[in-house]
Amino acid sequence: MVAEKENLVEVSNLKMYFPVKKGIVFQRHVADIKAVDDVSFTIKKGETLGLVGESGCGKTTTGRCILQLNTPTSGSVNFDGHELTEMKPADLRAFRSRMQMIFQDPYSSLDPRQSCGGIVSEPLIVHNMVKSKNEIKDQIEELLSVVGLNPSMAGRFPHEFSGGQRQRIGVARALAVRPDLIVCDEPVSALDVSIQAQVINLLEDLQEQFDLTYLFIAHDLSVVRHISDRIGVMYLGHMVELADRLELYDNPQHPYTKALLSAVPIPDPVAEATRERIVLEGDVPSPLNPPEGCVFKTRCSKVGCSGGDVTMELMESTPGHFVDSCVHSK
Amino acid sequence: MAALLEVKNLRTHFYTIEGEVKAVDGVSYDLQPGEILGLVGESGCGKSVSAMSVMRLIPWPPGKILDGEVLFDGVDLLQLEEEEMRKIRGKEIGMVFQEPMTSLNPVLTIGKQLTETMELHLGLTPEEATNRAIELLEMVGIPDAGSRLPQYPHQFSGGMRQRVMIAMAMSCNPRLIIADEPTTALDVTIQAQILDLMQDLCRQNGVALIVITHNLGVVARYADRVNVMYAGNVVERGSAQEIYHNPQHPYTKGLLNSVPRLDDTVKKKLDPIQGLPPSLSKPCLCQFCGEPQPTLVEVSKDHLAARCNADPNCVGWFPRDLG
């Protein structure tokens, strides 16, 4: 690891509850879906923090809350020393150019009626970063060549590109305003394996070139482990383990992390035959009605663990390795 | 041992506005009874179409099986009358589809959907069929099966629905199950549950299984033998051990180098395959020597790789759009 860097993003006690309403005229608030429930972590400048977990565990919502695309129910999001949750919309707008997002589906995240050049240059125009038409043209050319597309393709429309090329347009759009932080929400899940590798390499090269910080959200553990410096594992709205990429793989402590790692097959029949396998029973409980206490207790394999009276919180077990406190309790 | 399924030189083309798409263009493989075969490849390489052709589920128009033989237990399925084919589908060959959300009928109960095939193929009475349905659901690990029968698919989770699909495929004691991306829509922990279940059931009952997937890890974990498909052709075929430890075709090598592995010890750069797969509506010419059709050549015992006929020095038939 490089010398201790300062934090770019500090998230503390972040909660995002989506209300469930019933009734047509008088909408009664009947319940909350606890998409993110008391999550805290930091992202250092220039690092990649991976977030993994199964669908519905709140990883995307966490990313959206950092960008203030969802207004968190409570908690704080501190970006480079500025508190985002209490900021006025006009002030927030200035910060939006410093944090961008890359979306999962390259087919639905690009406007089909806008040309590739138009898509890439729109953030520049919105943030008043370009003055003349010539400057826009230069910027488009530069951005497209940075992401490995031919600048002469600027006039084409999204349907004329393949999935991998579209994702490159998405990357160019995020890069246009020269952000510090990019939230990558499952950027390669919709792509074929050979194309995945191209986009992953591109993201790594750009990070080096532009000194970017990534929050990399994905469900594919092999990809997350490849690209991240540190990895957080989420389950039902809670962060259950957070550690350095190698530490998390070599020394997983939470039973969910262990099961998740062992569920990912390795493309090698010999290695597969000798691996220890943990298969979790049952399904993830509904976030509308999560279990009391430890949310993992319905699938937990730990003997003698009731998990009923504990509160979910992260504890540092070894330096830099945080794990849910339930693991340490008797 | 006589092969259970033998596909010979299968060609399935689609006639579209943009021209003739050669989705499957001369595919041959065989499958022994009780064997698990992995069919890997990227989207559009023809892996699903080749499996659908075995079941004769290609809609005309636009698709048509032009040529080839599909010998199931010595009988050519492509020559059968539609009536006879219906006796094979669901009875001798079961199928598990990718989307557990859309492959079950939303307006029929789970019980109805399960018993329907058994009443048709096995001639069971409704009562016998219901009892067997309960047995099947318990076998695939659905608790409290009796009370789940009158429920509808929307009351089941994704993993549970895929279990129902497996129960349905197993219901008439088939000799072969074709699973088309059975776990792509599911989370990893559920994926492990479902695939372990399928593997156990097939091993116990001596059912052969074709798993179609794009996930190289899934194939390594579950398959005995592997077919790697690319651009409508099988480009490499062999035991899982051989394919992963001694890959011969440049595409297989490229695929294995382009995925990050969970057990990598050093962080190394991924080595992606340059370019894009070729369009199947144009002739697919090898990028190295321009040959339009590959031949499978034996590399070692039970391990074949695609080579070009014209140029013996070419490393393998590998058309690629490098534009």
Image (tube, grey):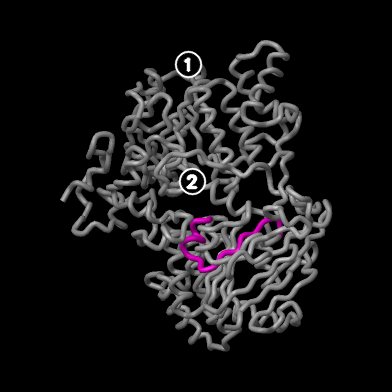
Q: What residue type is labelled 2?
A: Pro
Q: Residue B242 carries which label?
A: none
Which of B237 and A196 lies nearest the eye of the viewer?
B237
Q: Residue at x 74, y 82 (%)?
A: B80
Q: Residue at x 57, y 43 (%)?
A: A196
Q: Image quarter for residue B204?
A: bottom left
**Chain ID, mark 2:** B
Residue at which label 2 appears: B260
Magenta span includes A311: no
For the residue labelled by badge 2, is the local secondary structure a helix, a strand or a loop? loop
For the magenta stretch, what is the residue range?
B216-232
Q: Which residue lies furthest to the front in this view?
A: B313
Are there few (<14), some (14-19), or many (20+) residues within 10 Å of tag 1? Answer: few
Which of B21 and A156 lies nearest the eye of the viewer?
B21
In the image, is A214 to the left or to the right of B229? left
Magenta span includes B229: yes
In the image, is B192 to the left or to the right of B56? left
The quadrant of the picture occupied by the N terminus of chain A is top left
Are there few (<14), some (14-19), or many (20+) residues within 10 Å of tag 2? Answer: many
In the image, is B265 to the left or to the right of B5? left
B153 lies above or below B202 = above
Q: Image quarter for residue B40?
A: bottom right
Residue at which label 1 appears: A91
In the image, is B34 to the left or to the right of A143? left
Task: Judge whether residue A19 can be spotted in this image.
Answer: no
Q: Residue B70 in the image: state x and y as whole percent.
A: 70, 76
B7 lies above or below A49 = below
Which of A165 and A41 lies nearest the eye of the viewer?
A165
Q: Residue B135 in the image: state x and y as whole percent.
A: 43, 79
B254 lies above or below A85 = below
